[in-house]
Image (tube, helix red, strand yellow):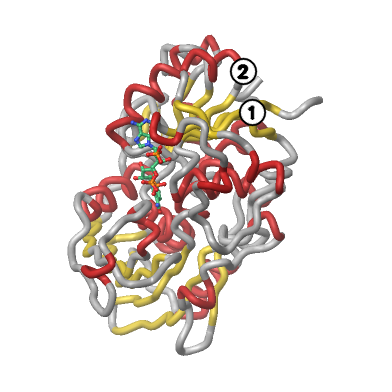
Amino acid sequence: VSNMQVAVLGATGMIGQRFIQLLEGHPFFDINGLYASERSDGKRVSQVLKIKDYEFDQETLETEIKQIDVKKIAESCRIAFSGLPSEIARDIEQDLADKGVAVFSNASSHRMRDDVPLLIPEVNPDHLEVIRSQKTFGDGGFIVTNANCSTTGIALPLKALDDAFGLKLVCVSTYQALSGAGYPGVPSLDIIGNVLPYIKSEEEKMEMEILKMLGILEDGRVRFADFDMLANCVRVPVIDGHLESLIMTFVEDPDLDEVASALSEFRADPQHLELPTAPIEPIIVRDEVDRPQPALDAYAGEPERARGMAVTVGRLRKKDMYFKAFALSHNTLRGGAGGSVLNAELAVEKGYLR
Ligand SMILES: NC(=O)c1ccc[n+]([C@@H]2O[C@H](COP(=O)([O-])OP(=O)(O)OC[C@H]3O[C@@H](n4cnc5c(N)ncnc54)[C@H](OP(=O)(O)O)[C@@H]3O)[C@@H](O)[C@H]2O)c1
């Protein structure tokens, strides 16, 4: 069987370029076209490179970026991977779904719709089923979203811990990388030698999205989880990798070894199905007193295609009823393009993409 043809939307941005990286040599998907705004029309990838830690194939570097043309994409592609800003994504993604294209999006515009799954294949693979209630599903078009990058980083450990011990309260404080703000992002004079204790709408997104993802599918709809979730979000001068501090209480009272085992032994559909971008160990637990760190752990994950897809958890501690930990994940890979690619791989394996 030949590979599915895919379009990348926002191909000049931080997420778009991670899509291109992950789609090079992909066993299921072939890049059919790279798209961005009118400003980028006719430019080659080599002229708009944003990612500095990956070497693209020569063929990719020579590929021309085109202005988005919904009709053309619908004629040539089965899938569109979207790294568009939310304001732009809302209409373009719906137009594509209306024309029979399966859209896997990083944008927030459709995340909270009842008929759109907010999907992480290790966390809530069954939620994919809600796409059947999108009116375009019969013609092959639908929208699947992934969560905000900071929510994704804690969703995997929280899922493992909720399954094992029942979450009651989660307080998270983030140390978020600059690439999470897109390109060029935060002005250098605001962030070098500084931290910014405000990221617009981020805390609200985290507090809502996690409850949708850890919710239960009932009669084709997601019933939100009901533990207490509090977030403080901060931008720090790091290029890639969101570090997040967690303080949690559980229904049960496990000891720390049990917490560590629940995390490190966690496996889910992507591992059982051996999806190409799935890390063999989705949650890596480290014992060192000074891990995880963005500089050392952002690219955790094996095999090669799953680098940056594992979440690293460390500094597990317990005080009275409170459990403390740090989690780290790559915001544009696991928290962005990698999340969407894994969602599409799951949709292929589960038969939603014929
Ligand atoms: N960065 C992260 O860690 C992260 C994680 C999860 C989700 N997200 C979400 O993913 C999306 C992309 O984020 P990003 O960080 O990659 O942003 P970015 O670096 O600013 O890239 C935005 C992309 O959208 C294109 N674009 C902007 N306006 C357009 C228009 N009018 N028509 C067509 N294309 C247009 C840009 O093309 P031009 O170069 O031509 O302007 C560029 O390719 C956002 O919705 C963001 O919230 C980001």
Q: Is residue 198 left or right of residue 169?
A: left
Q: How many marks?
A: 2
The reply to whether the residue tagged 2 has its Cβ within 8 angstroms of ligand 1 is no
CB under 8 Å between discs 2 and 1: yes
The image quadrant in which ligand 1 is located = top left
Position of the C terminus, as image quadrant, is top right
- Residue 60 percent across, percent down from the top left: 66, 43
- Residue at position x 34%, y 65% from top? 176
Most foreground residue, 16 or 160: 16
Tell me the tag on residue 32: 1
Q: Which residue was labeled with disc 2?
A: 76
Q: Quadrant of residue 146?
A: top left
Most foreground residue, 302 or 200: 200
Q: Callout 1: 10 Å neighbours few (<14), some, many (20+)? A: some
The disc labelled 2 sits on which kind of residue?
A: Ser
Real-space Cα distance between discs 2 and 1? 7 Å
Tag 2 secondary structure: helix
- Residue at position x 52%, y 54% from top? 333
Q: Can residue 162 be seen from the camera position used here?
A: no
- Residue 287 percent across, percent down from the top left: 53, 85
Q: Quadrant of residue 251?
A: bottom left
152, above or below 299, in the image? above
Q: Can residue 240 be seen from the camera position used here?
A: yes
Q: Is residue 47 left or right of residue 195?
A: right
Between discs 2 and 1, the one toward the N terminus:
1
